[in-house]
Image (cartoon, rainbow, N blue to C red):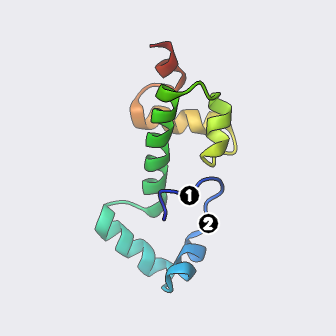
Amino acid sequence: MLINMHGKLPTLNELAAQFGCSARLLNDDFVAEFGGSIYAFITSQRLDEAHEAILQSNVPLKTLAFKLGYAHVNHFITAFRKKYGYPPGSLRKQ
């Protein structure tokens, strides 16, 4: 369910309400199971999806960033570079 979310993410409280538990319990259980926060997990999955999309298509980075829930393409580029060590545009130059 979380991996397939695109666009604006729900708050931790909204997610907890969907799962019928407190935000703290949801977060603590998620960290115990996956080793990081829910949002770190979603961000990592989205960036993996972006990496594949960049390799497989010519979708503009701005379009891809908005599709994946980033309000500004610069935030997407920064997150991508932090995870992979290079900017997303460099994939298309290879």
The residue that appears at 67% across and 32% down in the rendered structure is 62
Is 89 positioned to the left or the right of 29 in the image? right
Q: Which mark is residue 23?
A: none
Instruction: Of the two numbered discs 1 and 2 on the same chain, state the one appearing first in sequence.
Output: 1
Q: Residues within 10 Å of mark 2 (few under 14, many from 20)?
A: few
Q: Quadrant of the C terminus?
A: top left
Residue 9 in percent (x, y) is at: 61, 60
Is 84 positioned to the left or the right of 76 in the image? left
Q: Which mark is residue 5?
A: 1
Residue 38, by quadrant, is: bottom left
Decide: marks 1, 2 in contact (CB < 8 A)? Answer: yes
State whether residue 82 is above or below residue 35.
above
State whether residue 71 is above or below residue 88.
below
The residue that appears at 42% across and 80% down in the rendered structure is 25
Q: Residues within 10 Å of mark 1 (few under 14, many from 20)?
A: some
Q: Which mark is residue 10?
A: 2
The residue that appears at 59% across and 24% down in the rendered structure is 58
Element on which disc 1 rests: loop
Residue 49 in percent (x, y) is at: 47, 42
